[in-house]
Amino acid sequence: MNAAPADLLLNLAMLLGLLLALALWWTLRFGGYRGKIAERARAVAHARPTADVAPLDATGDGRTGLAARALARVAALGDRLPLFDAGHRLKLRAGLQRAGFRSRSAVSVLVGVKFIAGLACATLTVLFGADLTTLAQYPAVRALLMTGAFMVGMIAPEYAVAFRAARRRRQIAAYLPDALDLFVICTNAGNSLVVGMRRVATEMATICPPLAAELALTADELRLSGDSVRALHGLAERVDVPSVRALISTLTQSMRYGTPITQALRTLSRTERVAHMVALEEAAAKLAPKMVLPMMLFILPAVCAVAAGPAVIQLIAMLGQLR
């Protein structure tokens, strides 16, 4: 590092001042009330263990226990941080559910990870900012860099969750026609909606685990709750795929008006299969224009070198003999 020890101490003092100001603002505004509620909620959760609490590893090496304790500490940090209001936390919960994270403490873990990532980026900026730019010697510029790095670290985990949710949606949309075909077979065999959905989830577990998990959860909700429309709409909200929304609309209309589910599912399966084939044909048609530039940059020079190389070598040899 090229920064002087005085500059390093000044940077650390500024970072510590920012953290103290944030802690003072939280204490004055909230008075620790949210932390007390979170403590009571965690006490109840530890007294009554649920399914989303990871058990200890059966091998006894403690890796799963260490990971669970680390996540619990990050969740406790997220509970105490007053960074987001209830509306934004509900939005974060919806994004986490679309990414496949349905744990009770998922939002708290995400908030804790966001704060830790922001703090890490701010610390790295404080330590190495002087080596990146000469303007970092001014305290105002240094504070702006630290604040910007903190904001970038806070935003990055949300983009990671959104990327995972988008990849999960593409995977579900790709295997949905197969699930609809299995659903048609189950309904033709006389199975009910719950039994057929559970059977499809079992068969799709090895092919598309995200779709199988969502169908299994919806089947459990249909079996336990009497409101089937709400359970189906919950599936549409968690998955957020147009094809799944069309499936939920078809099932809802069939239950409301008493129309046969088999014929509606067969028509929807055929439509989704055709739409999937059209999407594949469109992607294949786009390959030819996309391959022009790589071929001109990488393949055409190699072909020219192989085809014209011997002739150029012979021509150079003949010119050398004539001289």
Image (cartoon, helix red, strand yellow):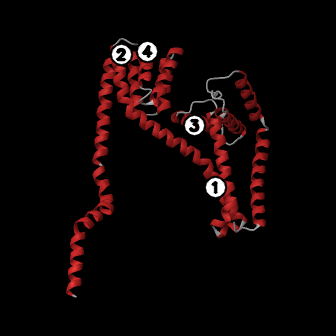
Earlier along the polypeptide chain: callout 2 or callout 4? 2
- Residue 86 visible (yes or no): no
Q: Do the residues labelled 3 and 1 touch (CB within 8 Å)?
A: no
Give me the residue at 54% from left, 37% from top: 95
| Separation (CA) of disc 1 from disc 2 | 55 Å
| Separation (CA) of disc 3 from disc 1 | 24 Å
Identify residue for label 3. Answer: 91
Mark 2 closeness class: few <14, some 14–19, many ≥20 residues within 10 Å: some
| Separation (CA) of disc 1 from disc 4 | 51 Å
Q: Where is residue 226 in the image (x, y as percent from the top left)?
A: 52, 14
Identify residue for label 1. Answer: 149
Earlier along the polypeptide chain: callout 3 or callout 1? 3
Earlier along the polypeptide chain: callout 4 or callout 3? 3
Give the structural element (helix, strand or loop) at label 1.
Answer: helix
| Separation (CA) of disc 2 from disc 4 | 9 Å
Q: Nearer the viewer, mark 4 or mark 3?
A: 4
The residue type indicated by label 4 comes to Val
Nearest the viewer among 139 and 112 is 112
Most extreme residue toward the bottom is 323
Q: Do the residues labelled 3 and 2 touch (CB within 8 Å)?
A: no
Q: Is residue 258 above or below residue 88?
A: above
Identify residue for label 4. Answer: 195
Q: Which of marks 3 and 1 is in front?
A: 1
Left or right: 105 as drawn, with respect to 291: right
The residue type indicated by label 1 comes to Ala
The residue type indicated by label 3 comes to Lys
Query: Which mark, residue 187?
Result: 2
Q: Nearer the viewer, mark 1 or mark 4?
A: 4
Give me the residue at 78% from left, 50% from top: 20
